[in-house]
Amino acid sequence: MTQNEPRVFPPDFVWGAATASYQIEGAAREGGRTPSIWDTFSHTPGRVLGGDTGDVACDHFHRFRDDIDLMAGLGLGAYRFSVSWSRVQPTGRGPAVQTGLDFYRELVDGLLERGIAPALTLYHWDLPQELEDAGGWPARETAERFAEYATIVGEALGDRVAMWTTHNEPFCAALLGYGSGVHAPGRTEPESMLKAAHHLNLSHGLATQALRAVLPRSAQVGITFNPGVIRPFSDSPEDADAARRIDALHTRIFTDPVLHGSYPQDLRQDTARVSDWSFVRDGDEATIHQPIDFLGLNYYTPTVVSFAQDGAVKGNDGHGVSEHSQWVGSEDVVQFHPAPGEVTDMGWVIDPTGLTDLLLRFHREVPGLPLYVTENGAACPDKADDAGVVHDSDRIAYVHGHLAAAHKAMEQGVDLRGYFLWSLLDNFEWAYGYSKRFGMVHVDFETLQRTPKASARWYAEVIAAGQLPA
Ligand code: FCB
């Protein structure tokens, strides 16, 4: 295929868009919902840019019907959303609250009526605060609570949701939440970070078992990772070793136990100063290693690392992390570098080849496992014209480049089943608050009015044609 031909996708390719509960729902205190760690974190001065919170966000909780109309207008085939744990099980324990479950049931029914397949994620980082108070993810019990929560949601929605994801990016939940502290709950405790990673993995295994027990056999269960696409700064053996270390800590800490049933030995050695890993009990790795039906992959930008001479891990890995030293032991020396090239409004370099590489990696690593791109997109410095329309040619170029990269992987045999653009709406971008806009639909955070951007119209055309223009 040459650059000048349209790229045709298979007729059953799933064209979607993604969001997450805390980033869009608002209604933080309604219907019995209790605070999650993101409510607490965002209400703590200095944690989120501008003091922004998800109290109102896009007010999707009240406007979800309009949002479904927007999705239908775009011709979306699927919508990936997450469930707020403390909305359906406020204390993280015991019985569910009916109003919470009703909200998701109405959302799902509305989607199905419009022919949009719901893709449900159980956990996109909003742990009930009560469970954090009891120890959070570093506590083993949280994994057991998660399985109970999975049963509740599975029983309530299993008859109408076909695609289930346990976790979104456990990397962020564990490493940013408990390691660097730039995400909720904002702890900076190296061993807690490793325990959190393990209990997130364990909770995936337990929840997958719990879901299998209550879902119809046809339901698809998987997990979403954001594996680093780690590139060594040079071809020196030292830089290759730096890349190996960060690949272990960012990616294989999750993918190895989930996909292969054991933690990487090199990771255990690299982190030996921090922990003896005695929190991994006999049988845990087998529990984590449940058969899954698909793997979700999120990709935004690659990471460039080198060996650093002076004993510190420094720089920025493109995900808001600047200090890794305590994670890998003081003798470990890794330097993060800005990758060359144009960047998005996040400062993340635009490199679609990373998506092709990522898809090929997991195609080779787990042959036969269907893959989805569950997130990909760009924050852009959007400006509306007089009519309120954003002409985001930069976002269109980003998505075009990445869809072409995904298509290239498919040409090489990757079983890619679908693509979910991040995001449907401008929303609460975690520690950046409302300062970063990822939506293909503009949201005015004063009036909450939604206005599709040029990228939304462009994406609708791609979906309708089932192909990417040359
Ligand atoms: C991912 C998150 C998602 C969004 C995008 C930009 O790491 O899963 O919620 O913030 O980044």
Image (cartoon, grey):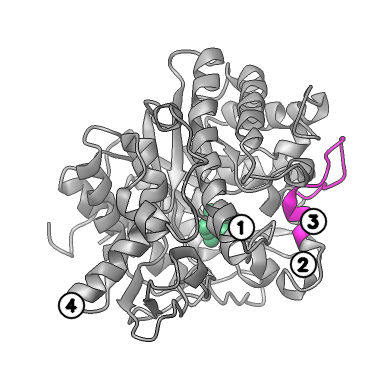
Q: Which residue is mark 1?
A: 178
Q: Any magenta on residue 27?
A: yes
Helix, strand, or loop for circle 4? loop
Helix, strand, or loop for circle 2? loop
Magenta residues (range): 26-41
Q: Amino acid at mark 3?
A: Thr
Pointers 1 and 2 in contact (C-beta within 8 Å): no
Estimate how packed mark 2 is, as few (under 14), some (14 to 19) or many (20 or more) residues with alpha carbons within 10 Å.
many
Front in this rendered view, residue 277 or 166: 277
Q: Amino acid at mark 4?
A: Ser
Q: Sequence order check: which comes first, mark 1 or mark 4?
A: 1
Left-right relation of 144 to 13: right
Front in this rendered view, residue 424 or 31: 31
Q: Which residue is mark 4?
A: 236
User: What residue occupies the far bottom of the structure in this picture?
Assistant: 310
Q: Which residue is mark 2?
A: 52
Q: Any magenta on residue 427?
A: no
Q: Position of residue 67 (x, y in %)?
A: 66, 45
Q: Sequence order check: which comes first, mark 3 or mark 1?
A: 3
